[in-house]
Image (cartoon, rainbow, N blue to C red):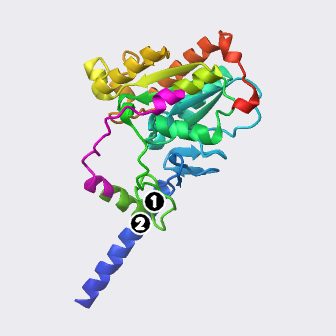
Amino acid sequence: MRRRWLFASVGLASGLIGAELVLRGLGRRDHPLFEADARYEYLMRPHQDVRYGRIHYVTNALGLRSPPVGPKRGRRVLVIGDSVINGGQQTTQDSLATEKAARRTGVEVINLSAGSWGTENAMAWIRAHGLLHADALFIVLSSHDAYDRMTFEPLVGHHPSYPAERPPLALVAELARRTHRILHRQPPTGHRMFASGWRDLRDTALVLGLPLTVVLHPELGELAMGRYDDRGARILDSLAAWRVPMVPLIGRMDSAMYTDRIHLNDRGQAALADVLVEQIGLLTGTNTFGHDPSPGTR
């Protein structure tokens, strides 16, 4: 009996060690880390260079998934968004739409985003750090972001997708992720007040004379319907009233470009990059693109 327990214990220990080694080999312990912030809720920690499996994450000194932002040498655009433009666990650094657009246009494209961010998070970040002397602004968000408002509910260090510290074991991280999925299957109740960040971003661009374009990203259900839902319609109505240019992606995307109902695979990121390249090209041909307000306004 004692030998049986010994063999079982050795087998269990060997299995756990083997699983830990496999998970570490897949990078499951090396999730990018986040920092909570009293102004815009949270953002990825600065100066990270990690691999989560095949996904390579790099963040600059500002905590953005972009190359370092130094002195401005040419044209620069700021792309605001959530996990779609951020790429998250679906997209490695070189495959991001912003990275592709920068390589193809020669324009500096800054990726101002974080998973589950909305317009209020982005506007709060801009109030804290400025517009980085951008020549144009793009917003890449979805219908569900119509009512996405900041709540400052504890997230960093509480949700497995937003770790504050690296766990001691990959097994611990994997167990936390799986447990969280089981315990939180029901989506949270959404707010029904239109997010103030939409108008704030429009007003900021208007005051500074910056071109602003919204790229409305469809969810899979909207692709199937062939139209945006009531939340997307609210965004479209507001943009039309404010005379903000909008690029609908329905008709340009298909289900093979998605990893789930919202997020894009590499093919989807490439299609989104095509849109950014087109819009950057349009702006390049206008006089407003080169408009550069005095440094004190940025």
Q: Give the residue at x 47% y 17%.
A: 242
Instruction: Report the disc number at residue 157.
Output: 1
> In this picture, is 172 found above or below 278?
below
Q: Residue furthest left?
A: 1
Q: Give the residue at x 70% y 18%.
A: 291
Residue that mark 2 sits on: 18
User: Residue 64, image x and y in percent?
Assistant: 59, 42
What type is the residue that disc 1 sits on? Answer: Gly
Pick the quarter of the image with the C terminus. Answer: top right
Q: From the viewer's perspective, tell me whether residue 231 is left or right of residue 155.
A: left
Label 1 crowd (10 A; few <14 / some 14-19 / many >=20): some
Q: From the viewer's perspective, tell me whether residue 104 is left or right of residue 96.
A: right
Q: From the viewer's perspective, tell me whether residue 67 is left or right of residue 259.
A: right
Q: Give the residue at x 37% y 75%.
A: 13
What type is the residue that disc 2 sits on? Answer: Gly
- Could you tell me if residue 33 is visible in this image? no
Label 2 crowd (10 A; few <14 / some 14-19 / many >=20): few
Q: Nearer the viewer, residue 290 or 224?
A: 290
Whether residue 200 appears in magenta in the rendering, the answer is yes
Q: Circle 1 sits in a helix, a strand or a loop, which is it?
A: loop
- Could you tell me if residue 24 is visible in this image? yes
Q: Nearer the viewer, residue 114 or 124?
A: 124
The magenta segment is 180-201
Q: Are marks 1 and 2 in contact (CB under 8 Å)?
A: no
